Amino acid sequence: MVCINICIILTKSFHLLVLTLLVLFSIKTASGCGCNGTGAGAGGGSKSSLKTPPKNHHLVFADPRIAKVYPVIQKFKKTITSDPLGVTKTWVGPNVCNYKGFFCESPPDNKSAIALASVDFNGFHLRAPSLHGFLDQLPDVAIFHANSNHFSGNISSDIAANLPYLYELDISNNNFSGEFPVSILAVKTLSFLDLRFNSFSGSVPPELFTMELDALFLNNNEFTDGLPDFYAARYHYLSLANNKFSGQIPGSISAALSGASEVLLLNNTFSGCLPYEIGFSEDILVIDARSNRLTGPLPFSFGQLEKAEVLSFAGNLMYGNVPEEVCGLGNLTSLCLADNYFSMIGPVCMGLIASGVLDVRSNCIPGLPFQRSIYDCLDFFSSPRYCG
């Protein structure tokens, strides 16, 4: 009987010991989860919370290439001082491909891999002091668009070496300034470059016009000096508008425009005559060279621009006859020659005036309304005019 009582007491003591150890273990586990910030204190220590440690090296990424850019993005995120749309709130966790503004695809060198292929920050209005250490550290990026933000600083010299697939770069409508970012010249894969609406200044390096770009947008900056000869360039779109470019437009531009559809040269101080070679650029839809200091006649060769829809040379110092060949282009919707010194037009051009296609106001054409005064015209023609 004594033995039985002792056994019962020992058994109860063992059960109490086991229960005590279980309670202590549970308290230790719960307190450990709470310190890790997983929310176990409030949620009861669920299995899902225990499987998501907060430290970066424990995060599970879809691909090692994604893991490589994760810290780059997080570092850049810390430099952003303004995010009015709350874009960076989505830049959390290992699924970089779901971050707003980031897009993933298989890289060219490994179709079974997943990599960050493009960045599209257009219209996000983010503010950061620089893209240095961000753009140049995204090795698989092919497209980088950051239109309409508040970025500034320099473009890293490592961009060419570190981004072997980059072919579209758009940093337009930002706060960049200073000289042309020469590091871009080394990016041989580039086919689209957009630097519009910044405050870049100084000369444009001649090497830029040897790059095989499909589209080049430099408009609305403060670039100065003349244009070099165009060599390897073959543009679909070329915009140099609203700068301070000067000098003659080189005849070699015609080769660069052989497949172009839009050429915007307006609001500069280009001088000399329009190169007749431009008339051989048969795919052109739009040429806008208004508000310069171009002189000489409108080349007859422009009558070969059969696809042309808009031709604008208003606000220059051009003179002579308006070629009937140009007025006869079948697709023209606007031919603007106002504010020049043209002195004669033929019946085909007269028909375009009646239809509202041709604007020749403020010229020196006898018999037409809204022309310059005779004194203004005589003063202009009293001095010899040269293309050079």
Image (tube, grey):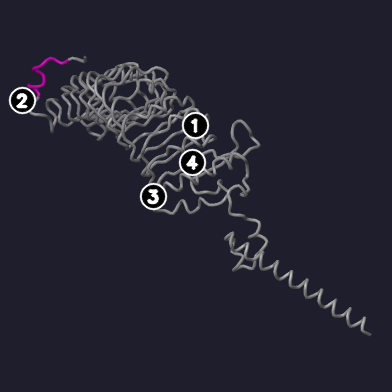
The residue lying furthest to the front in this view is 2
Residue marked by disc 2: 375
Q: CA distance from mark 3 to mark 1?
A: 27 Å
| Amino acid at the residue labelled 2 | Tyr
Q: Is residue 300 magenta?
A: no
Question: In the structure shown, which secondary structural element does the residue marked by tag 2 occupy?
Answer: helix
The residue where tag 3 is placed is: 81
Q: Residue at x 62, y 55 (%)?
A: 52
Identify the mark nearer the N-term, 2 or 4.
4
Q: Which callout, 4 or 3, points to the residue nearer the camera?
A: 3
Categorize mark 2 by other alpha carbons within 10 Å: few (<14), some (14-19), many (20+).
few
Q: Is residue 380 magenta?
A: yes
What is the crowding at mark 3: few (fewer than 14 residues within 10 Å), some, or many (at least 20)? Answer: few
Q: Which residue is mark 1?
A: 166
Q: Is residue 59 left or right of residue 328?
A: right
Compare marks 4 and 3 and give the one earlier in the sequence.
3
- In the current view of this chain or complex, which residue is farthest to the bottom? 1
How crowded pointer 1 is (Cα within 10 Å; few <14, some 14-19, many 20+) is rated as: many
Tell me the CA gap for discs 2 and 3: 59 Å
x, y percentage for residue 387?
21, 15
- Position of 380 relative to 135 (above/below): above
